[in-house]
Amino acid sequence: MPADFNWAIGGEAGDGIDSTGKIFAQALSRAGRHVFTSKDFASRIRGGYTAYKVRTAIDPVQSVVDRLDVLIALTQRTIDENLDELHEGSVIIYDGDRSTMADVEIPEGMIGLDVPLKALAEEAGGAIMRNVVALGAACAVADFPIENLDSALKKRFGGKGEAIVENNKKAARAGLEYVHEEFDYEFDYDLETTDNDYVLINGDQAIGMGAIAAGCRFYAGYPITPATDVMEYLTGRIERYGGHVVQAEDELAAINLALGAARAGARSMTATSGPGIDLMAETFGLVATSETPLVIVDVMRSGPSTGMPTKQEQGDLNMMLYGGHGEIPRFVVAPTSISECFWKTVEAFNMAEKYQVPVYVAADLAMAVTEQTFAPEVFDMDKVEIDRGKVVDEDSIDEWLDEKGRFQPHALTDDGISPRAFPGTEQGAHMSTGLEHDELGRRTEDREMRVEQVDKRERKVETAKSSEDLSPREFGDADSDTLILSWGSNEGALVEALDFLEEDGIDVRFLSVPYMFPRPDLTEDIEAADEVIVVECNATGQFANVVEHDTLTRVKRINKYDGVRFKADELAEQIKATLDAEEVSA
Amino acid sequence: MSSDVRFTDFKSDKQPTWCPGCGDFGTMNGIMKALANSGTDPDNTFVVAGIGCSGKIGTYMHSYAIHGVHGRSLPVAAGVKLANPNLTVVAAGGDGDGYSIGAGHFIHAVRRNVDMAYTVMDNRIYGLTKGQASPTSREDFETSTTPDGPQQPPVNPHALALAAGGTFIAQSFATDHKRHAEIVQAAIEHDGFGFVNVFSPCVTFNDVDTYDYFRDNLVDLADTDHDPTDYDAAKEKILDSSKEYEGIIYQDESSVSYEEKFGVTENMSDIPSGAPDDAMDLVREFY
């Protein structure tokens, strides 16, 4: 029996794929199994192929692989789309009565289970429950105790009344019993359960949760795939803590609302995807030059322009590092996993206020919309610390007043960081502007002051480099001559790829870099290695380029930009191929 | 807040660079008087401006202020107010800022009805870029970029505001000092979005919409039997393009501000030094 089990449901958008997948994932998680989900969806509401995949194991899983053991196919296309991942013995559950599946073609060597999903659902109380019948059938195939499905069904349908929950339980059992009674197969799976308590969370939700934990009280955003979950999470929750979410008229309004709230002293955030970052660019410059602490989340998707809204890419690094006219420090932190989406968001708020800079949180679709199980302690709230930086009050403001008693919000300091006075602070009244300004915040074109203010802002970067721990996360064999570098959501797939490589006797060292600016100095690590490979989901190697720039060393690259995230087994093959190519050329 | 605040307390020691005779002087003085009369003080006041001549207003005033980017003063002001509802917030902009590049924000700010005042210094021309047509320029107003006039009807900001559900819609004239300050104060004290279009003549580039023109053509609604709480009467005045009106054109006295509606009442700058006490509940939701 394989250590992990891979399951999917696929059909047309509008078939209830997402909620069905979620119920199954939740049932597995509540049964103490690790779960990693991924979604394959098209940019439309009804029609078009969509799938929800679940990988589960007793040991932690943190990526997807190229294999499907059980597939619930609501359309023929579901089978066709997943042909590469299906294998000899894969089980396909379908409803032969469904018009689109009447002449279904089950590939050779695979097991087709024709289950009358709709008919069984109707018997249980309504055709709408046909996907739940399929879940019951899947439980039969996977030997997964169906009782574990019950609490997930209760969570999903509890709000609609006990009768609906009971009907769904009945529907699930009808699917289970049908498989047991009608088919005579010995399936190769046994999804055992444990007593472990897990939570199942996606990256966008982790970002929202991190924001609340960090004291974010104001959020303004405009709905955009794949960042919308952040706003949906915060709505209805942030109010419990005295906060508020505004759905703005556009991204320009969103960042300006967030800027206003930040100037008023709130921890403030906006989240969007690449096209929204484009629109925010002008105000981004104002945020930076007025030295306003603000967290801006970019959940990257395929670009440019509208690109592929529902597909993965890490193509916005250059924009976050360099976007906007003029020159200004901005920090870019990049979570490397779903749990890091939480912790890096907390950190982003502290960095924003400590250094009075805009901080980008560079997330991406692959981690934003997929869920993973964690022990709740991974999000230990007692470990959240809030550092508001140099905030002055009535008692401490004196030191920052000039000879005329005026507050100096852009005072020239050794560490580059000036005092902040929240509105309402006596004697703190001051002006902020996007114009170059003096220490009082007043417009100036004085050559000397211009240079002093630019240098002051740049000094913050040096201060951060010397006081923040910017270390990468390290995996694999520390002594290996082969060094893999990556950023963002590729971490999980790479960590699992290391296992595949180890099986082949290949040991590598992997550094997953969560800080894009300021960045850790990787020079020594690179000089110590014979081979350096930078892995990222874009075509031009944006991170590889900055690594080369920083370390004056050429690196190898593995780039993927077809809209699909890296899979662990596929990545292992590519790393091997890159290393082999090197041997051949040597 | 102290009761002995004078309007000069809102003045900074920076000398304005507006052209001598510019309407913006009167506009600004009126705003400062309105603020002082409304009982706030500089440390509890936030002024938000866009760019252009009008955008300089925050520099010449003394309060918490931000000089933002072109056309975006309204969302910034709303963000300030929602984050700290104790502040008195005034957004100031020009006709290009408010009705052209920021027109989208204008309509949505009106709809949102956040408790703040919005004063637009309307000179019917672009001044700081040296005399191009603005969205309120007359159809036949000849400028460097519109030699035959814009050939498009001017924007009617009051009609936009009324259509968007505006709860306080007014107009004033920069040199009618007392009246202008009164109207702005009423906008500040209105429970919701107080919108005042201020005729603020550009003496350098606009030789049509001059002080004399407004003096000769302005009808003060206070001198008529206009009832600002009468929606239909307001609509009639707003759609009457044959006259220029001064005064409160429309006020919905039952207006409920955004903050009140959504219960946004706390100063959001006050947060604990760690995660909220019950934050693990947020994690447990994901069981």
Image (cartoon, helix red, strand yellow):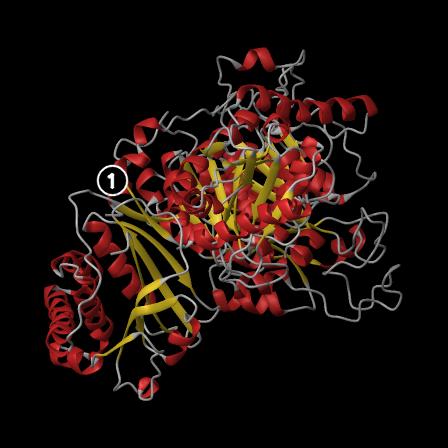
The residue at the point 47 percent across, 69 percent down is A42
Res. B208 in view: yes
At mark 1, the secondary structure is: helix
Residue marked by disc 1: B281
The residue at the point 75 percent across, 52 percent down is B123
Residue B275 as seen in the image, left or right of residue B14: left
Q: Position of residue A559 (x, y in %)?
A: 59, 52
Q: Quadrant of the C terminus of chain A?
A: top right
Asked which quadrant contains residue A556, the reply is top right
Label 1 crowd (10 A; few <14 / some 14-19 / many >=20) = few
Q: Quadrant of the N terminus of chain A?
A: bottom left
Task: Tell which of A445 and A478 is nearer to you.
Answer: A478
Position of A52 relative to A330 (above/below) = below
Q: Amino acid at mark 1?
A: Asp
The tally of labels here is 1
Res. B92 in view: no
Position of B180 relative to A126 (above/below) = above
Position of A326 relative to A558 (above/below) = above
The residue at the point 36 percent across, 67 percent down is A87
Q: Position of residue A473 (x, y in %)?
A: 47, 33
Q: Position of residue B218 (x, y in %)?
A: 70, 57
Q: Position of residue A8 (x, y in %)?
A: 33, 65
Position of A27 relative to A70 (above/below) = above
The residue at the point 33 percent across, 88 percent down is A103
Q: For mark 1, name the chain.
A: B
Task: Tell which of B144 and A269 is nearer to you.
Answer: A269
